[in-house]
């Protein structure tokens, strides 16, 4: 069956939903960039491509599509299935706890267990009512820094990334959300010139070398700089732990996401008393340390 023939015989949204599900299942796609399965991904891509509300599918299922709409859908579905491009890069957007962010392949698709902690004001682990300054290391799209700005509107927020291309994406998102975030090009703390904060959060690179070789193709569309972190996945985290204390005010909090590296981290730093919040869907993914617990 030719592509043109496919486009001609699939006329309704429901037809294209069924086709996308079949195509995605046949391709054995990996999900983890905002969708949990093929159905959610197909529904999202169809609604987004047709510029329809992404939370309403049922009313549009019987709608007959125009030829140009069918051609757009075919192109998007085939790119997702054959090139395994994450949906966020195809639509240019991603959502994190209901907040929308513009996305390009210059940044990883927003996903962080720290996001929910920010929106919950780090309760019950820390009191953010007195936070006057906060830093987001490895900001990427700027999503965590922007959530900090929404949650702590009176605090000064800095956001750091080593990638100029990522900072351009972050700048667009800061403007989109109408918040104030100071974006800084820096390799972790190197350009911060002794600045101190009440709160530091980071979702740094943390994929170890073995896991990098086994990543699904979808993740290989993301910048390797934002994923890989040495043999054991702790290269960036070691630097953060070695420098965070001098950039935190007394009583300040450090929150770092490390994926599945808890055992390796605790073996590398046996004398640190990490707190491991039990988060929905992510036990042992984030550690917390107060300034006073950090090494000098």
Image: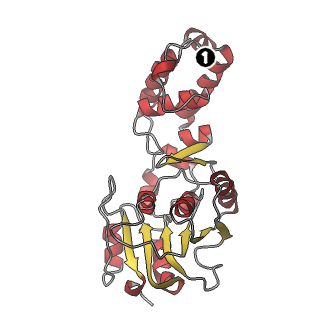
Q: Position of residue 1 (x, y in %)?
A: 55, 12
Q: Residue at x 56, y 65 (%)?
A: 153
Q: Position of residue 295 (x, y in %)?
A: 42, 87
* 96 or 133, nearer to the observer: 133
Q: Residue at x 66, y 54 (%)?
A: 169
Q: Is residue 30 above or below residue 254?
A: above
**Left or right: 29 with respect to 272?**
right
Q: How is the image coloured?
A: secondary structure
Q: Is residue 85 visible?
A: no
**Left or right: 211 with respect to 172?**
left
Can you tell which quarter of the image residue 31 is in?
top left
Q: Is residue 282 visible?
A: yes
* 296 or 134, nearer to the observer: 134
Q: Is residue 295 above or below residue 31?
A: below
On the image, numbered disc 1 is attached to which residue? 3
Q: Residue at x 64, y 53 (%)?
A: 173
Q: Residues within 10 Å of mark 1 (few under 14, many from 20)?
A: few
* 50 or 271, nearer to the observer: 50
What number of labels is visible?
Answer: 1
Element type where label 1 sits in the image: helix
**Considering the image in quadrants, where does the C terminus appear?**
bottom left
**Left or right: 124 with respect to 61?**
left
Q: Position of residue 75 (x, y in %)?
A: 62, 26
């Amino acid at each position: 069956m030719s592509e043109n023939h496919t486009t001609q015989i699939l006329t309704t949204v429901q037809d294209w939903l069924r086709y996308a599900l079949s195509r995605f299942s046949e391709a054995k796609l990996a999900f983890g960039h905002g969708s949990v399965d093929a159905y959610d991904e197909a529904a999202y891509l169809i609604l987004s491509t047709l510029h329809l509300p992404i939370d309403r599918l049922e009313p549009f299922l019987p709608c007959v599509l125009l030829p140009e709409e069918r051609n757009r859908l075919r192109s998007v579905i085939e790119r997702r299935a054959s090139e395994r491009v994450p949906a966020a890069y195809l639509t240019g957007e991603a959502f994190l706890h209901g907040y929308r962010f513009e996305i390009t392949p210059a940044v990883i698709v927003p996903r962080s267990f720290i996001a929910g902690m920010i929106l919950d004001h780090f309760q019950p682990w820390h009191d953010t009512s007195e936070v006057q300054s906060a830093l987001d290391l490895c900001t990427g799209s700027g999503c965590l820094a922007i959530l900090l700005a929404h949650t702590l509107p009176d605090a000064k927020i800095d956001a750091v990334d080593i990638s100029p291309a990522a900072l351009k994406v972050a700048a667009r998102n800061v403007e989109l959300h109408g918040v104030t975030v100071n974006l800084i090009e820096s390799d972790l703390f190197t350009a911060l010139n002794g600045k101190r904060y009440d709160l530091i959060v980071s979702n740094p690179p943390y994929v170890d070398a073995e896991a990098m070789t086994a990543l699904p193709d979808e993740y290989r569309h993301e910048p390797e700089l934002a994923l890989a972190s040495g043999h054991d996945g702790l290269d960036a985290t070691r630097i953060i732990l070695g420098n965070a204390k001098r950039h935190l005010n007394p009583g300040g909090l450090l929150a770092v996401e490390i994926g599945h590296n808890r055992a390796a981290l605790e073996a590398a730093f046996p004398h640190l008393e990490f707190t491991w919040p039990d988060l929905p869907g992510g036990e042992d993914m984030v550690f917390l340390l107060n300034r006073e617990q950090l090494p000098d």
